[in-house]
Amino acid sequence: MTVLEPRQILDRLVAFPTISRDSNLELIDWVEGYLAGHGIAARRHWNEDRRKAALFAHVGPWQPGGVVLSGHSDVVPVDGQVWASDPWEVTERDGRLFGRGTCDMKGFVALAIWALVEAQGRTLRRPLQIALSYDEELGCTGAPPMIAAMQSTLPQAAAALIGEPTGMRIVTGHKGGTGYRVHVRGFEVHSSLLPEGVSAIMEAARLIHWMNAQNEANAAKPVTPLAAGFRPSYTTLHSGMIAGGTAHNITAADCRFVMEFRVVPGESVDAWAAALEAEAARMATAMRAVRPEAGVHLDRFFAVPPLVPETAGTAEALVRQLTGENGSGVVSYGTEAGQFQAAGYSAVICGPGDIAQAHQADEYLELAQFQAGHGFMQRLVESLA
């Protein structure tokens, strides 16, 4: 089979519209077939309804201590966005590669696939692996079962390089996070009889007010060393979607909103989840004292551990060697790096592109960044050979 250059691989990957709500199997089929054509046996881990799959593979000596290149196959929708070119075709303009996922993060995935095939043709001292997940854009829900399947199947790598766009700079920490879909159930009465009913909207406002109070308290706390590099340097609670009610003069029977936590390293994601659940339970008890039908239902739909900066981390040392960079940074968004670290890998984030371009109309990856990523992969393979 012909060996494809990174740009050719990127063209193939972007052509698959792997929006998170849809299947990613056409892309997985292609990647698996391409690797097989070069003598690399890949393994799948299916999701529950088998509409999606993760893919991972190993080249080099069958021993632990190697490097895993981690990326996700899914992208966000283009619905409602106005693009200057076809989002499912890579278009080069003004030194930029436009297309959905070029930046987040099929550019890195294309480079990782190229590196694996390149490494297959070399004699390696240490192995190289690839891990391609699904549903990262839905809350990093596909990575944990994939990582567990890898650990039961492959020798464990010493370092995990997660290729989210960082401008090829080293990121050693990110916030953890969790999210809830909240359904507040009230009881309808005419608003003139307000005390005899339960307004789901007004009760939801109590929980949102509790969130605001937590933000104010967190902002007032002394900044810890682990949190100092983050912007903001404390845990935040946020709600960006809310809906409910029937009419202005009826107490609302239902109110639904979505909330998220972004938790600094050093604090527990689960502890914050427990605090929310305790507050919701307290509220529900008071609501049921008025109407037994009332209550609060919480649906926790994702949980991502933080990436904690490591002391003398294997992954960080490797990336410094390959990039020559002495600095490091942290980010407030979550990635699968924290999940790899929680599973026992040394993990760091480093990939081509600017996160500001992710999820946007006319998403693009600077050609110079893609070329820098290619150089990084060439040096990585050389270091393992």
Image: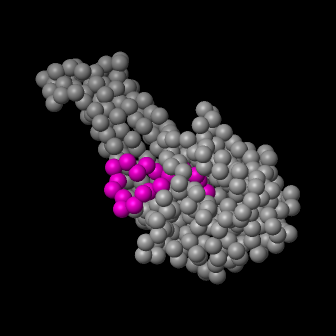
Report the residue at 36% width, 58% height from top. Answer: 83
Nearest to the observer: residue 20 or residue 97 = 97
Nearest to the observer: residue 111 or residue 333 = 111
Q: Is residue 44 above or below residue 89?
A: above
Which percent across, then down, holds residue 110? 62, 62
Q: Is residue 119 above or below residue 214?
A: below
Report the residue at 71% width, 51% height from top. Answer: 33
Nearest to the observer: residue 84 or residue 380 = 84
Q: In this view, does 371 lie above or below 103?
A: below
* Residue 289 location, quadrant: top left
Horizontal arrangement in the rendering, residue 385 relative to residue 103 (left or right): right
Quarter of the figure that contains the N terminus: bottom right
Q: Does the magenta stretch include residue 351?
A: no
Q: Is residue 81 visible?
A: yes
* Residue 49 location, quadrant: top right
* Residue 204 location, quadrant: top left
Q: Is residue 235 visible?
A: no
Horizontal arrangement in the rendering, residue 217 relative to residue 89 (left or right): left
Q: Main secondary structure of the magenta part?
A: loop
Q: In this view, does 269 lie above or below 158?
A: above
Horizontal arrangement in the rendering, residue 56 relative to residue 188 (left or right): right
Horizontal arrangement in the rendering, residue 353 relative to residue 296 (left or right): right
Which percent across, then down, holds residue 41? 78, 51
Which residue of the protein is positioned furthest toward the top in this rendering?
Answer: 292
Report the residue at 45% width, 40% height from top. Answer: 180
Which percent across, then down, holds residue 71? 61, 57
Report the residue at 46% width, 76% height from top. Answer: 95
Q: Does the magenta stretch include residue 75?
A: yes
Magenta stretch in the rendered image: 71-88
Which percent across, then down, holds residue 210? 35, 44
Which residue of the protein is positioned furthest toward the front in this rendering?
Answer: 2
